[in-house]
Image (tube, rainbow, N blue to C red):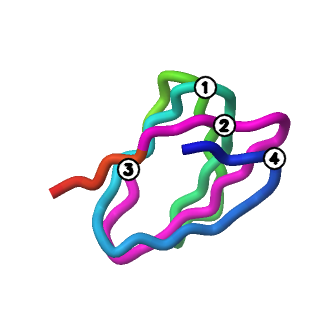
Amino acid sequence: GLIHRGRYHFETGKAERMEIVAGTCRSRLDGSHEFRQYDAGGTFEVPAKSGFDIEVPDGHCEYICSFLD
């Protein structure tokens, strides 16, 4: 997938892994107060039945989202 510059909120029913393949983003899981930065090669996991904020400061960020069993 591709996320353009900006801040977005996504919700998920199933647990998922976000793998950043190009660009840079910052993400904050629901219930957390801090954003963490992820560059190409970084990953983060989102628990089932939750959500996260993602912010792309410049350009765009490319990712692969995999649902976890």
Q: Which residues are magenta?
A: 44-64
Q: From the viewer's perspective, is 40 left or right of 41?
A: right
Q: Quadrant of residue 12?
A: bottom left
Q: Nearer the viewer, mark 3 or mark 1?
A: 1
Q: Disc 3 versus disc 4: distance between alpha carbons?
A: 21 Å
Q: Disc 2 versus disc 4: distance between alpha carbons?
A: 8 Å
Q: Secondary structure at mark 4?
A: strand
Give whichever of discs 2 and 1 has the lower sequence position.
Answer: 1
Q: Is residue 31 above or below residue 24?
A: below
Q: Are marks 2 and 4 in contact (CB under 8 Å)?
A: no
Q: Disc 2 versus disc 3: distance between alpha carbons?
A: 17 Å
Please state the horizontal and vertical placement of residue 11, each as a whole percent of the image: 49, 72
Q: Secondary structure at mark 1?
A: strand
Residue plotted at (34% across, 64% down): 47
Give whichever of discs 2 and 3 has the lower sequence position.
Answer: 3
User: What type of secondary structure mainly makes up the magenta span?
Assistant: strand
As rendered, which of 52 and 22 lies closer to the eye? 22
| Residue furthest front as drawn | 1
Q: Disc 3 versus disc 1: distance between alpha carbons?
A: 17 Å
Please state the horizontal and vertical placement of residue 69, each as a whole percent of the image: 15, 57
Residue 52 shown in magenta:
yes
Q: Which residue is mark 3?
A: 45
Q: Which residue is mark 4?
A: 5
Q: From the viewer's perspective, is 40 left or right of 35?
A: left
Residue plotted at (75% across, 46% down): 4
As rendered, which of 33 and 37 lies closer to the eye? 37
Residue plotted at (52% across, 27% down): 21
Give whichever of discs 4 and 1 has the lower sequence position.
Answer: 4
Q: Which residue is mark 1?
A: 22
Q: From the viewer's perspective, is 64 left or right of 35?
A: left
Q: Which residue is mark 2?
A: 61
Q: Are marks 3 and 4 in contact (CB under 8 Å)?
A: no
